[in-house]
Image (cartoon, grey):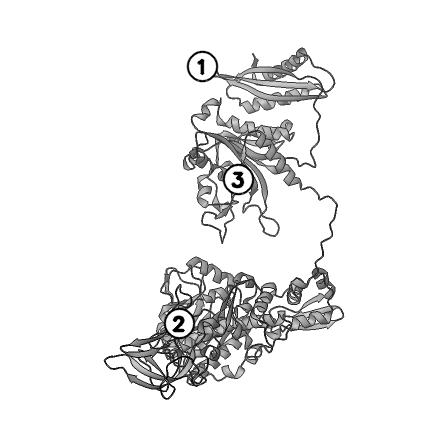
Amino acid sequence: MKVSVNWIKEYLSFELPPIDKLVEKIGAQLGGVDEVIDLGARYRGIIVVKVVECAPMPDSDHLSICKVDDDKVAKDVERDANGLVQVVCGAPNIKAGMLVAWLPPGSTVPATAEDVEPFVLSAKPFRGVTSNGMLASAKELAIGDSHEGILELGDKVKPGDDFATAYKLDDYIIDIENKMFTHRPDLFGQIGVAREVAGILGQQFMSADWYAHGLPDMLDAASDELGLEVHNELPALVPRFMAVAISGVDGSMPSSPALQTYLSRVGIRPISMIVDITNYMMVLTGQPLHAYDYDKVKALSGGDKATLTVRNPHPGEKLTLLNGKEIEPRAEAIMIATDQKLIGLGGVMGGADTEVDANTKRIILECANFDMYSIRRSSMAHGIFSDAVTRFNKGQSPLQNHRIMAEAVHLMKQLSDGQAVLASAVIDNNHLDEMVLSRQSLYPAVKVATEFINDRLGLSLSAEEMKALLEYTEFVVNIGGDMLEVTSPFWRTDIELREDVVEEVGRLYGYDKLPLVLPARDLTPAVEDQMLSLKARIRRILADAGANEALTYSFVHGDLLNKARQDSDQAFALSNALSPDLQYYRLSLTPSLLDKVHANIKAGYDQFALFELGKVHATSAVDEHGLPEEFDRLSLVFAADQKASKQYGGAAYFQARKYLMNVVAEFGLMPGLKLRPLAVADLADHQLLEQLSRTYEPNRAAVIYVGDQMVGVVGEYRNSARRLLKLPDYCAGFELFLSVLPDESRSQYVALPRFPKVSQDISLKLPVTISYQEVYDFVWEELGKVQPEQTLPQLGPVDIYQREDDSAHQQITLRLTIASYERTLTDAEVNKLLDTVAAAAQTKYGAERL
């Protein structure tokens, strides 16, 4: 946001401090200052002169020899007997009697001031005739684009005047970063900044009458000369839309040099009087306006009147914008249209078909409010970042529209010498709440105690002092005891809560004045976060087992969900994604890890285990407020290329299972842990688990149970996922719900026995139809029935073997390691335990102990 110091001075009743002090104050209490430009330095030495004589140069078809009167202000310049200075000029519009800007020898052309080598003028001969400097066009003065003729100055200046002073170009431009004003749309206008500068300097600000009270008479003199209609199909997105037709204007007429300098100071390119007035009001107040060529709108309306309709685009409709870009608007965009055609992207940019040009004689002036979120989405979708977007996406107050339109009409009449007149009724399509309109404030008065404010700022201000601070910037404040009743002015859109008033008082008082007191420190130990402790413990367990932690985005591309066979309709879609690759909240962690496998294999890592601790979400799981619930998960994937996988016996499933057992054993869950084939699991009532399971091969994966609760999946991945994600053949993993793991507060210390451990194997010959997991669960359960008290048993796999000449049977070997807390167990005692288990296995499965 560029702020002209001279411009804001026009609205202040006191002297501003030196520029360095002012910038320091703005940076401390208003917004970060990016740059300060000494604009006056560009115009130093430029003088207003009158062309007294103007004669064609001999042997030239375009040059003129001019004699100019500078009231003898310039020094060290050659003059004739009458004190006039000779200047050669090639402009076609030069003539005697004009007041123009003269750049004497030694001055710099303002348009080149920022060049690497600025152009410095001198006394220079043209075809034997000396020219002392030059007479400047608007482009050379850097206040416009026109260079076809000399800029003719108004009659409010006289020869000898300093050009920069006369047009207030002896100025400083303060560039404040826009993000500091995100919640303050009023500060995107010079009036708003002037008001805030007064407030932080402790001075009273009074808005101009036309802004504070409006110019009611200016909009009352409407006629029926031109027919105009407005239809608003989107009142929720466009709460107020004002329009009026104006005749007697001239689209070819430039604005006054003074108005051009106002715009150029803050980086706006002057175009014509009509367009310049709309831009001037936008920069002054923060409220964008737009002018349409009335006759072009009428021609596209298909009737005897001009019609403006606010609506969404129809399928296939396109629009060519003022910048020449053709777009097919997004379906939810706010569009301005006639009966037949789109003519503008509401709040973003007008259309080329109704542009004001040199032939325009009648216009429609629009002053509207648009939903800032819709404007932001349209701007991003179509890559259009106009000055109007900058302001509309901050949320302008709809209570200022009629005031700004009235002042714009006033300027239109004034600068056209009274030729511009209202030619239709002023249409105010207003959908604001009656309470808002009656109180002329967007929010009700905020009641707040002085103690509430002082406690948060560390101050001891009285109610009267707070009232004075707020009234500097035109708040209405009533005091009742120690309570303040604060009513925000109509241009403020951010004062809704007590905390907003606290912030306003603190800012106006000055954050640099707040007491520097160290906060009291409570020595009570912080309560340990059990989830953080749980995750730290998991990290240690898996890191000790050789696994590496990965951290991936919580958002994934829909294509990754498809590759993992998960349903993107079950995932929350992001309406404003950080990247096209981050479209959805993930349904499980597994796809994110699988997406990293191929890259690591390709980078030369032949075998590795990756794990991640993170959260997942699904549309099927929301709380009572409709907000997504979060589920903590642990996921791991083990992968090895073809060469490295040869060192492992058996399928990849068992490597993943080994990591899983390592985790659950550390948390003491082995007694209740069961693995059951995924192919036969009923997941109908467990949508998140069902989505997770889709990535796994049903016949080579198992559902993880703790007791009767399903808590995850372990196994190998579907062939389709392996192919699409370029996974190696030897690849498996698991995903586990962290809710099943006991947190540190529930963990209990289990001492190791002092007596030696005894290990013995049990090898059973069983039918191949019985799964390893079923055998393991059976043996563990039977051991629990017969093992002596005060013992600590462990059971693990040794071997699964099938003879080539016996396809109907398999041999499963398990190793029991057991120790007593009371005495040393003998081999015979342990063997007796296994005999009992073997007998039970024979009864149930017909198993033979080998």
Which of 405 and 108 lies nearest the eye of the viewer? 108
Q: Residue furthest right?
A: 481
- Disc 3, disc 1: CB below 8 Å? no
Above or below, 572 relative to 610: below
Q: Residues within 10 Å of mark 2 (few under 14, many from 20)?
A: many
Task: Indicate which disc, 2 or 3, sits on the residue closer to the N terminus.
Answer: 2
Above or below, 274 relative to 623: below
Q: Which mark is residue 285?
A: none
Give the percent coordinates (x, y) of residue 191.
55, 73
Q: Which residue in the protein does label 1 denote?
A: 804
Whether residue 124 sits left or right of residue 807 in the image: it is left
Whether residue 268 sits left or right of residue 535 in the image: it is left
Q: Which residue in the protein does label 2 denote?
A: 109
Of badges 3 and 1, the one in the foreground is 3
Give the percent coordinates (x, y) of residue 239.
52, 69
Q: Residues within 10 Å of mark 1 (few under 14, many from 20)?
A: few
Question: Mark 2 to mark 3: distance in Å?
Answer: 64 Å
Give the percent coordinates (x, y) of residue 786.
68, 18
